[in-house]
Image (tube, rainbow, N blue to C red):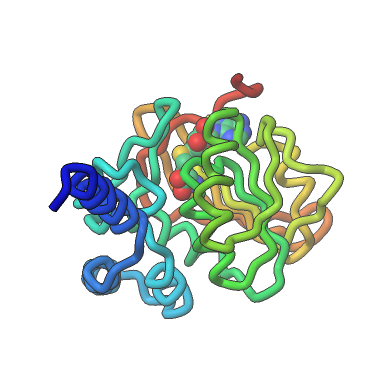
Amino acid sequence: MAKKNVIYVQEYKLYLNSQKIRMDSFRHKGLREKLIKDLREKGIHNEDVLDAMSRVPRHLFMDSSFINFSYTDKAFPISSGQTISQPYTVAVQTQLLEVQRHQKVLELGTGSGYQTAVLLELGARVYTIERQRQLFLDAQKTLMPLNYKPVYFYGDGYEGVPSYAPFDKILVTAAAPEIPRKLLDQLAIGGVLVIPEGDEAGQKMIRIERKSEKDYQKTEHGHFSFVPLLRGKNN
Ligand code: SAH
């Protein structure tokens, strides 16, 4: 074979390899089924949530160097010093939210976009806010080719998104030292807010249901560890 052709073949092989990494293969689907089984054994019982998670290719939301770890039940670093939440945590939060099709859901902390994709798989209309500019941009690059279409905001989630309120559901994916008042105000009556409350030492998972204009019912659902919900936005 001529030298030029050898180079072409090598380049084509490299190209195919890079495509394989960004694809969802039978191997990935198999690993995902194992992860779902693991989540079921850990007590996740909502079949809609498990189905939604079985459809989202988590490996495509992580740096390709972590591809072998994508379907272990662990949080992993993404850029800007943030993390993609542990699948169990995503499952617990999503289950507590009780998302129905077509509901308006506000997510604080787009991060990798993985949780956003899970909410979209449940048929929600998703509004997602991220304070790190790089993550805000990267999440769009990940979600768009997978045909996931949330409404993106670059800003401080503490403010919520008053122009689109009220929301049926609000999900906070970073640790808040206290429950932000503005989020409670932007919750529809009958709506639910799920938020990890606490400091770096650890947080309690809190579910708040708005019963009427002034009444909110608060319940606790175990201990978790999130990156902090920070004020302002970051360039
Ligand atoms: N849902 C994400 C989890 C990312 S970790 C995922 O599935 O990957 C939490 C994210 O919250 C980080 O990306 C962090 O930058 C973001 N964050 C922290 N404080 C915020 C705030 N005030 N407003 C919006 N996003 C915030």
Splitting the image into 4 quarters, where does residue 35 fall? bottom left
| Quadrant of the drawing holding the C terminus | top right
The extreme right residue here reads 163
**Front one among 20 and 24:** 20
Say which of 71 and 4 sits in front. 4
Q: Residue at x 65, y 22 (%)?
A: 232
Q: Residue at x 20, y 47 (%)?
A: 10
Farthest top residue? Answer: 235
Task: Name the outermost residue toward the bottom.
Answer: 47
Locate residue 224: give its quadrant: top left
56 with respect to 43 (left or right): right
In-image side of 2 versus 201 (left or right): left
Q: Nearer the viewer, residue 69 or 47?
A: 69
x then y, percent, for residue 15: 31, 50
Please say whether residue 176 is visible from this viewpoint. Answer: no
Callout count: 0
Residue at point 73%, 40% (across, down): 160
Q: In the rendered view, does 131 fall on the left or right side of 223?
A: right
Residue 87 in the image: above or below residue 158:
below
Where residue 180 appears, as percent x and y from the top left, is: 66, 36
Q: For this rendering, which residue is in front, 205 or 217?
A: 205
Whether residue 109 appears in this view of the structure is: yes
5 sits to left or right of 132:
left
Residue 192 is situated, as x and y percent measured from the top left of the image, at 64, 59
* Residue 42 pos. (x, y %): 25, 66
Residue farthest front in this picture? 2
In the rendered view, tell whether residue 76 sits above or below residue 90.
above
Q: Residue at x 56, y 53 (%)?
A: 194
